[in-house]
Amino acid sequence: NFVEGIGQGLASAVTGVYSGVTDVFLKPVEGAKNEGVKGFFGGMFKGVTGLFAKPLSGFFEFISQSTEGFNQTFRVEEVPIVKKRKPRPFYTKDKCFKTFNKFHSDVITLLKSQHNSVVNMNDFDFCDCLDYLNMKKD
């Protein structure tokens, strides 16, 4: 969630700052032990580089974790829309609606389910349905 994301992000930022600051002192000593004077300067370079890079990396990790927590907290799951009533048919070529009639709606729904590939239902009105059914009888 959002609070956990902030917490993890702050922990990463603090770890980055701590690691960057300690590397300024530890890397030169480490380099001097392993390679002498050349290792000391190499360690200084690594330490100073880490002083900038690690806190910056921690800051970006903070942003990333906070954003992820925000997204998880406020994510809205899509709820499928379930139609409670069948569609109303159009009447006449002017595409008028009349008071809902369950039988007419059932006829339109049946025709859509049975003949959807044959009939363009967007241009189909209830009068066409009756004509279509009468043609099928003949």
Image: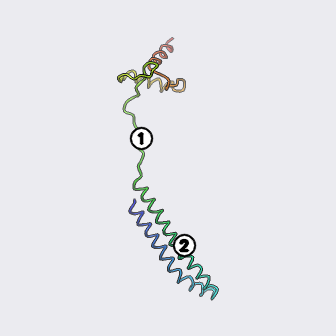
Q: How is the image coloured?
A: rainbow
Relative to 23, is 80 above or below? above
Contact, mark 1 vs mark 2 (Cβ under 8 Å): no
Residue at (41, 49) in percent of width and height: 76
| Residue located beneath label 1 in the image | 80
Q: Quadrant of the N terminus?
A: bottom left
Picture coordinates of residue 102, whole percent (x, y): 36, 23
Q: In the current view of this chain or complex, which residue is farthest to the left?
A: 99
In this rendering, the answer to whether 104 lies above or below 82 is above
In the picture, measured across the screen, residue 38 lies left or right of residue 101, that is: right
Question: If you read the primary sequence from the N terminus, does the residue marked by circle 1 or circle 2 appear first?
Answer: 2
- Element class at badge 2: helix
Q: Secondary structure at mark 1?
A: loop
Total marks in image: 2
Can you give x and y, in whole percent of width and height, for residue 49 in the image?
57, 76
Tell me which corner region of the image, top left, top right, bottom left or bottom right, holds residue 30: bottom right
Q: Amino acid at mark 2?
A: Ala
Please name which of the two marks, 1 or 2, marks the residue nearer to the observer: 2
Q: Amino acid at mark 1?
A: Pro
Crowding at mark 1 (Cα within 10 Å: few <14, some 14-19, many 20+)? few
Q: Which residue shows up at 47% across the image and 23% down it? A: 111
Task: Give residue 58's mark.
Answer: none
In depth, the one of 91 and 19 nearer the eye is 91
In the rendered image, residue 15, in percent from the top left (x then y), is placed at 47, 73
Q: Is residue 20 above or below residue 102?
A: below
The residue positioned 44% from the left and 66% from the top of the image is 9
Q: Which mark is residue 53?
A: 2
Instruction: Give the class, few, some or many, for how many residues have Cα within 10 Å of label 2's Cα (few <14, many ≥20).
Output: some
In space, the residues marked 1 and 2 are separated at their CA atoms by 46 Å
Nearest the viewer among 36 and 21 is: 21
